Image: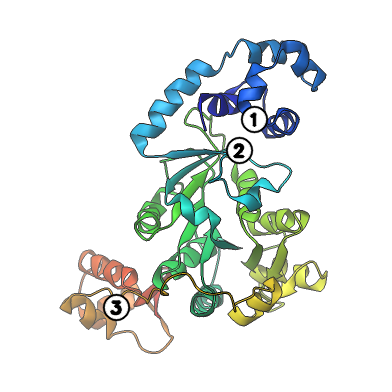
Amino acid sequence: MNINDIALTMEAGVGVKTAVALLEEFGTADAIYAASAADLVRAGLRETLAIQLVRKEAHKQAERELKYIEKQGITAIASTDEAYPPLLREINDYPHILYVQGDVKALRLRCLSMVGTRKFDTYGQTISERLVGQLAERVPGLCIVSGLAFGIDAACHRAALRHNVPTIAVVPNALPEIIPASNAGLARDILAHGGALVSEYHSNTKDKGDFYIPRNRIIAGLSEGTVVVQGDYKSGAMATAEFAFGYNRILMAVPGRATDQTANGPNLLIKSERAQMVCSGEDIIRAQMWDLNEPEVGPRPTPTQVPISADAAGLWGCFRGGDAVSVDALADLTALDYSTLAPLLLELEFAGKITRLPGGLYQRI
């Protein structure tokens, strides 16, 4: 990756598909910028855009971008680099540049995307934890990919962290900003545990809030398969499913009750035979046709036991079985105010003892 790669993605009028077409024609960004205007026009560019590339009008901006990402600890990977994820390179609208925070080696692991609704429930939370946990026990080199959104995405990232599985979060904005900001702590945990944050957007990108669907193609493109846990008919999870289906990747869905709105999307995918129904990690392994007789590289990590304070241990004793408990109920049980409960709940959540549910509820894992 060099300045020509960055510049190509910063040229006004050169979008993803134009960049892909040019790279398919010339091979590298260096060759594109070495071409004459006539060569570029013959490749399909309009004359004004061809002249713009010959003049290298985006290079000053690209120089500033290189300095910026170095300062921020961000790695830029071009589609022509060896480190670029090979599965993503196979799709017809791959981003030429990936901006990565964290361990770039995670991009070349056995990636599985798991996506779902922001309006998740206890069932979605439980099945996400169950699937990731079962896969962690059986699948070497696994990496969970999702979108760092509220709900199922965050639940799958957290489940991966609890089971010592690297996880990749693909974000719809330029790094190092985290959207939603409330998941910044989760993003830090992902980086601290060998995962990565990924974006296709440079720092000068004007965020108009319409990058969520394009982001979803990267989630699907990075992965050998995609699991839709929960989602309505029209949702980001279903958009990711459409991308995965269009890229000929294995598409899977978790069934739900016909009366639940969050089950509409997965049930439709199963009914239309676009997705395979999965209810366990073993179902996913069979759907993916993973050969688990391969020799494992290095020892399998064991879940890290995070120590908790005596106060947190006392609070944990208030959770019984699988019942969800509200903060108000915990305050009544312990006679603690919210300002005291909040850090203890966070400590238990980080230690993998409890999980947070919608509506201010918490549940023992």
Q: Position of residue 57 (x, y in %)?
A: 57, 13
Distance Cα–Cα, label 3 vs label 1: 60 Å
Of marks 3 and 2, which one's residue comes earlier in the chain? 2
**Other residues around mark 2 within 10 Å, as few (<14) / some (14–19) / many (≥20):** some
Towards the viewer: 153 or 119: 153
- Residue at the (35%, 54%) spot, across then down: 188
For the residues bearing labels 3 and 2, Cβ distance under 8 angstroms: no
Which of the 4 image quarters holds residue 353? bottom left
**Other residues around mark 1 within 10 Å, as few (<14) / some (14–19) / many (≥20):** some
**Amino acid type, callout 3:** Leu
Q: Position of residue 23 (x, y in %)?
A: 69, 31
Towards the viewer: 183 or 9: 9
For the residues bearing labels 3 and 1, Cβ distance under 8 angstroms: no
**Amino acid type, callout 2:** Thr
For the residues bearing labels 2 and 1, Cβ distance under 8 angstroms: yes
Disc sitting over residue 80 in the figure = 2
Towards the viewer: 328 or 100: 100
Give the secondary structure at mark 1: loop
Classify residue 96 as left or right of residue 233.
Answer: left
In the picture shown, does residue 326 fall above or below 224?
Answer: below
Nearest to the eye among marks 3 and 2: give it: 2
Give the secondary structure at mark 2: loop
Q: Badge 3 is on which residue? A: 330
Residue 116 visible, this orientation: no
- Position of the C terminus, as image quadrant, is bottom left
- Residue at the (56%, 24%) spot, across then down: 4
Q: Position of residue 260 (x, y in %)?
A: 66, 74
Residue 63 visible, this orientation: yes
